[in-house]
Amino acid sequence: MIQPVSWLEGTLELLDQTLLPQRELWLTLTRWEEVAEAIRRLAVRGAPAIGIAAAYALVLAVWTAEGEEDAGRKFAEAATGLAEARPTAVNLFWAIRRMEREWSAQAGQPLDTIPNALLAEARRIHAEDIEGNKRIGGHGSDLLPMGSSILTICNTGGLATGGYGTALGVVRAAWSAGRLEMAYLCETRPLLQGSRLNAWELMKEGIPFRILVDGAAGALLARGGVHAVLVGADRIAGNGDTANKIGTYTLGCVAARHEVPFYVVAPVSTIDREIEGGADIPIEERAHEEVLAPLGRPAAPEGSEAWNPAFDVTPAELISAIITERGVLRPPYERSIPAALA
Ligand code: MRU
């Protein structure tokens, strides 16, 4: 199983996803600031993986603290700094909140036991994600007919999670169950998470895939023969509106046009019950250079400007179901989401 982050004797080992598929370079990080930087530059990415990395980063923050006051200051500083790394994936804030609760629960305990208590909580967040993903995979696979072809965008596999995957976890589970014939992967401009990372994962497991440019997705769905669109999520609002990788909304529109089921696949930690609708989800805008010079090679005249939102919002009305570890949620999401979270 591909695990993008792992704790090793007081350090966080992290697979640098910016270098895949050409190089498999593991970074050894000892400071929370390095983890925040890795999140910012997408060395670790994908909503659940970002949350897990941040949880371990909070352990790093207190690992070598000298005295209770020092530990308290470092923990608070790290929690604030990590929360500023990326704005859209709610799993980041969810994981930080869970670690803050564990920190509070440790109040009054001797300092030498606190880092290990925090580490145990980070490990729980990590293990629960993998467990949950496997359940999601089962629920999702059951929805697919035998001999299915699916279309997906971005990377939602082991690399983007604790180690199994959400939308790509469904692909894995469907393949094991003998239900999958072909996974179509949008390359996912501008940073190519689909062609670099999804393809890298599926190739390792011998799962058949074909890569298409994002603009070809409409033609593929119009041609027929795709049984479902499976996408991940960075944040799901209380009404089911879902923020995910830029281009997801377009897939939702085209899937509706051609009556192809459009499934959002995510753990319940991606649901933000404090946000009612998609308009309130903060959308990250990234550097112009990602669009103007893909993979570092100029692709537009010097002086060009770009618009580079990392995510878009697919309205709930385009979403056939939300597949979670607690089951398959159907519209109206205002009812099914609170029931799943209860
Ligand atoms: O910018 P990224 O690569 O972090 O975007 C990731 C996505 O949009 C994923 O679909 C989402 O985080 C779900 S990952 C299981």
Image (cartoon, rainbow, N blue to C red):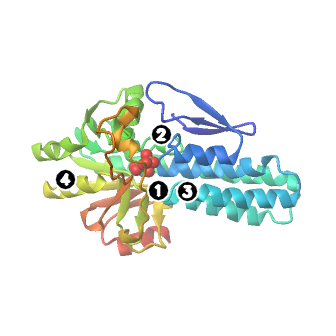
Q: Earlier in the sequence, mark 4 or mark 1?
A: 4
Is residue 60 rendered to the left or right of residue 241? right
**Residue that label 2 marks:** 158
Q: Are marks 2 and 3 in contact (CB under 8 Å)?
A: no
Q: Position of residue 150 (x, y in %)?
A: 26, 43
Q: Earlier in the sequence, mark 2 or mark 1?
A: 2
Is 303 in front, or is 73? 303
Q: Earlier in the sequence, mark 2 or mark 3?
A: 3
Q: Earlier in the sequence, mark 3 or mark 4?
A: 3
Mark 2 and mark 3: span between their CA atoms? 17 Å
Q: Earlier in the sequence, mark 4 or mark 2?
A: 2
Secondary structure under tag 1 reads loop
Which marked residue is nearer to the observer: mark 1 or mark 3?
Answer: 3
Q: Is residue 40 above or below residue 87?
A: above
- The kind of residue tagged 4 is Val
Q: Which mark is residue 260?
A: 4
Q: Is residue 136 above or below residue 205?
A: below
Mark 1 and mark 3: span between their CA atoms? 13 Å
Is residue 166 something that shows in the picture? Answer: no
Mark 4 and mark 1: span between their CA atoms? 23 Å
Mark 1, residues whose alpha carbon is within 10 Å: few (<14), some, or many (≥20)? many
The residue drawn where x is 71% and y is 40% is 30
Q: Position of residue 233 (x, y in %)?
A: 40, 55
